[in-house]
C-alpha cells in the first residue's frame, strides 16, 4: 500500500456516475430528487451547504438547518444563483441547535407542516 496521498484525479469513478452531479455542480442537476423532501443539518457551511444546494437543485424540497444564521444567509444567497425550480426544488432555512432535542422536534414539525 502506497503512503502517497490520493488526489481527486487519481480516483477511478464507476461509469454509472458519468455525467452525474455527484461532483457538486448543482447547475448540472437532472431532477433525480423531484418530489422528495429533506432536512439537511449543518447547511450553513461546507458539506451541509453543498448537500442542501445539490438536493434542492435536483428537485427536493429542502429545509436547511444550522446554528449560524449568517451561514444560512450565505446558503440562501448561493441558492439564488441556481435555478432550483427547474426540477421543482426549493430551499427554506431554520436556525437551530441540532444538539437540542426541543429544537430538533420543532424542526421536524416545521418540515412536516411546510414541506408535507
Image (cartoon, rainbow, N blue to C red):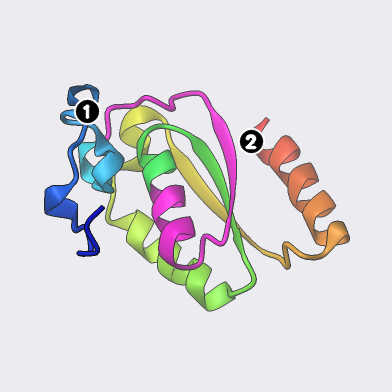
Residue at point 35% right, 29% down?
87
Say which of marks 2 and 1 sits in front. Answer: 1
Q: Position of residue 64 (x, y in %)?
A: 56, 54
In this rendering, position of residue 97 left or right of residue 12: right
Closer-to-camera residue (84/97): 97
Q: Quadrant of the C terminus?
A: top right
Q: Is residue 56 depicted above or below 15 in this figure?
A: below
Under tag 1, what secondary structure? Answer: loop
The residue sitting at the left extreme is 9
Classed neighbour count for the residue bearing mark 1: other residues with Cα under 10 Å, few (<14), some (14–19), many (≥20): few
Q: Which mark is residue 90?
A: none
Q: Earlier in the sequence, mark 2 or mark 1?
A: 1
* Residue 103 is covered by the magenta coloring: no
Q: Position of residue 61 (x, y in %)?
A: 52, 37
Residue at point 19% right, 45% down?
11
Total number of numbered labels? 2
| Residue range corresponding to the magenta coloring | 29-53
Find the distance from the CA under tag 2 to the CA under tag 1: 34 Å
Quadrant for residue 69, please give it: bottom right
Closer-to-camera residue (32/82): 32
Q: Which residue is mark 1?
A: 14
Q: Tags 2 and 1 in contact by the CB under 8 Å rule? A: no
Under tag 2, what secondary structure? Answer: helix
* Residue 34 is covered by the magenta coloring: yes
Q: Is residue 102 depicted above or below 89 in this figure?
A: below
In this rendering, position of residue 75 left or right of residue 22: right
Quadrant for residue 26, please give it: top left
Q: Position of residue 58 (x, y in %)?
A: 36, 34
Residue at point 53% right, 27% down?
36
Q: Which residue is mark 2?
A: 115
In this rendering, position of residue 41 left or right of residue 52: right
Amino acid at each position: 500500500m502506497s503512503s502517497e496521498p490520493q488526489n481527486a484525479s487519481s480516483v477511478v469513478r464507476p461509469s454509472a456516475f458519468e455525467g452525474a452531479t455527484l461532483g457538486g455542480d448543482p447547475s448540472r442537476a437532472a431532477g433525480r430528487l423531484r418530489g422528495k423532501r429533506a432536512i439537511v443539518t449543518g447547511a450553513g457551511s461546507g458539506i451541509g451547504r453543498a448537500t442542501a444546494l445539490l438536493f434542492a437543485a435536483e428537485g427536493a424540497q429542502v429545509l436547511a438547518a444550522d446554528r449560524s444564521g449568517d451561514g444560512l444567509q450565505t446558503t440562501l444567497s448561493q441558492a439564488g444563483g441556481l435555478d432550483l425550480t427547474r426540477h421543482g426544488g426549493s430551499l427554506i432555512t431554520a436556525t437551530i441547535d441540532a444538539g437540542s432535542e426541543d429544537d430538533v422536534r420543532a424542526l421536524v414539525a416545521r418540515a412536516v407542516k411546510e414541506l408535507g
